[in-house]
Amino acid sequence: METIEQETKQALEDLHQVFPLTNQILLVVGTSTSEVVGSHIGSNGSHEVAKGIYNVLCNLQQKTGVQLAFQCCEHLNRALVIEEETAKERGYEIVSAIPIRKAGGAMATYAFSKMKHPVLVEEIEAEAGIDIGDTLIGMHLKKVAVPIRSTVTSIGEAHLTMAKTRPKLIGGIRANYEKTNEHE
């Protein structure tokens, strides 16, 4: 468990270094605790792994103010557990469901049990994401997602992918993407 927590902490530090996580950032977290322990996704959810990863994320939230969204599994259509205040601030529609291990996944279920005022929403547009175990968080990231490389490539046995987002580059050959004196 200590190794899983340390790998998670390092991955989040790497993400924070490249893309500062603040109270203005929503971080989507997709986690297959089954994959972390070396099993097939959705087959062996672990309350203990969820607890360890959640604690690391809560410590990050306390230090940075980053907002957290925990993606449920496919049985809840990858809905997300977030704080009610975050849902309302961002204009997300709240839906009626409560995740359980077999319909939501161990991570989302654990988060729902520990958050102050948890609710489920169907979709979000997060500025950053961490995907532990190939849970397919991309559908919940703003456009345009940019991969972030970490010194950690897995959490336990689960493959790790992280991303930040940036505004779309629009225009064409005459477009400028950096401020210059020409803008004065």
Image (cartoon, rainbow, N blue to C red):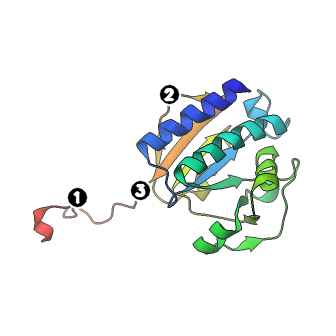
Q: CA distance from mark 1 to mark 2?
A: 30 Å
Residue 71, compared with residue 60, is above or below; it is below
Please report the residue visible at 62 percent of the width from the left and 34 percent of the height from the top: 8
- Figure quadrant of the N terminus: top right
> CB of mark 3 within 8 Å of CB of mark 2?
no
> CB of mark 1 within 8 Å of CB of mark 3?
no
Tell me residue 112's x, y (percent): 79, 55
> Quick check: can you spot residue 13?
yes
- Figure quadrant of the C terminus: bottom left
Q: Quadrant of residue 42?
A: top right
Q: CA distance from mark 1 to mark 3?
A: 14 Å
Residue 173, compared with residue 101, is above or below; it is below
Amino acid on which the number 2 mark rests in the picture: Thr
Q: Can you identify the residue that label 3 sits on?
A: 166
Please report the residue visible at 76 percent of the width from the left and 45 percent of the height from the top: 107
Numbered label attached to residue 178: 1
> What kind of element bears circle 2?
loop
Tell me residue 70's x, y (percent): 69, 53
Answer with left or right where residue 45 lies relative to residue 15.
right
- Sequence-first disc among 1 and 2: 2
Q: Can you identify the residue that label 2 sits on?
A: 151
- Residue nearest the observer in this picture, 139 or 149: 149
Q: CA distance from mark 3 to mark 2?
A: 22 Å
Amino acid on which the number 3 mark rests in the picture: Arg
Amino acid on which the number 1 mark rests in the picture: Glu
Farthest-out residue, front = 63
Tell me residue 146's x, y (percent): 45, 47
Q: Residues within 10 Å of mark 2 (few under 14, many from 20)?
A: few
> What kind of element bears circle 3?
loop
